[in-house]
Amino acid sequence: MFKKAKIGKNNKGDILKVYKRKSKAKGIIISIIIIILLSGIGYYLYNIYQSIEINDEYNAEKTSLSTELTQTVENEEKNKANIADVIEKITKSVCGISKLTDTGTSILSTATESELGLGTGIVVSNNGYILSNAHVTGDKYSTCYVTIEEDTYTGTVVWADSDLDLSITKIDAQNLEYVTLGSSNDIRVGETVYAIGNPIGYEFRQTVTSGIISAINRTIKLEEDDKVSYMSDLIQTDATINPGNSGGPLIYANGEVIGINSVKITSAEGMGFAVPINVVKPVIERFIQNGNFEEATLGIYVYDESVSQYLKLGNQLSSGIYVEQIIKRGSADGSGLKEGDIITKIDDKVPKTVNDLREYIYSKSPGDKVTLQVTRNKDERTVEITLGKK
């Protein structure tokens, strides 16, 4: 016979402890499962959110890029329209110039541009001052004929400088459209420019070509009629310039004139030159303000670094203006200035080129005094000169 086991106090407590351990373990497992599930759900939701955020950023970036492209296209179209408006306005101030009243109307004419004196000019005041090239209009007191739109005027050359190849002609007219003169001091290589003129003849008047500023401070050697001369401080451009363009404006896109088209090297393609506008601005201003201009002079012949390389005189000129010759009985004669001196300063101005020196002298009048700072054999000295009349 089996005996019934007796359940004592101790056995009962042990069983309760076992139940409690199992219950606690089960709770821990459930908690772990819940944590794992929550983590998985959280990770899933995070990935969905990130995907939405990335898509939003992509869409926003795509929209932004599309907007920028649209704005760029619109700006380009607007700029083109603005440039066209500017050129349309300035061409009203571009005129034809000839030494003869009847130059013919066909490019098949046997007369050459030089024989007819065909060229271009620009109106620089509302009362009839015309800026052009000296080789187009002729020397001071010469007569030429200026055509603006369909009207032709008889003009008198009131000022000319053959070294600069610039001239100013006066016609009897009022209320003319005239150009805005810009500054040629801060021009940079690579900037876009436009040339306007009358290539071949007035039949192709107000032709516009475009290009860039190819170089600045260029010097070229000219040989004509057994004479050698130099034009310095020129603006070089690849905008097409033909002989009839001489005297026409070189302009920025805003319409400001920065140069006067002057010469073209016929042996090289894509090389045109213009005289910087700043050198002649003082002359124009005096004519507009006073109706006349008395040209002052230092009474010397000079050159700068750009010309010295052609002369090959052994002078290592790195800066300043070299005094090559003092004109007898001129303003500088007896002033203490000597040939071979290097001008480093005139009053408070530091001339880097001959045109810088010209520009300053053009702003003065005969009888004015100027102070030159010069270098002679490495010694600095000061010379005072009373300007004469040219």
Image (cartoon, rainbow, N blue to C red):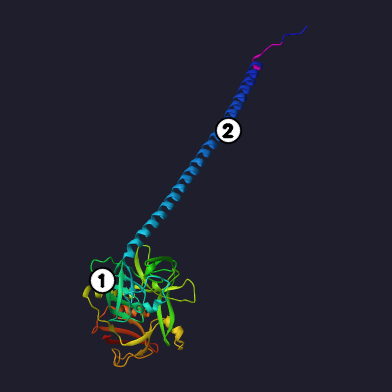
Residue 108 visible, this angle: yes
Q: Are marks 1 and 2 in contact (CB under 8 Å)?
A: no
SS at mark 2 in the image: helix
Q: Residues within 10 Å of mark 2 (few under 14, many from 20)?
A: few
Kindly identify the amino acid type of the residue bearing the numbered disc 1.
Answer: Gly
Residue at the spot 29% in from the left edge and 90% down from the top edge: 330
Quadrant the C terminus occupies: bottom left
The single residue placed furthest to the top in the displayed view is 1
The span from disc 1 to disc 2 (Cα, nearest Å) is 88 Å
The spot of residue 83 in percent (x, y) is 37, 60
Q: Name the residue that disc number 2 marks.
A: 40
User: Hey, which quadrant is residue 173 in on the image?
Assistant: bottom left
Comparing 324 with 205, the one in front is: 205
- Can you identify the residue that label 1 sits on? 128
Most distant residue in the left direction: 290
Could you tell me residue 88's position as x and y percent? 34, 61
Instruction: Work out whether 327 lies above or below 254.
Output: below
Magenta part of the chain: 5-10
Whether residue 8 appears in magenta in the rendering, the answer is yes
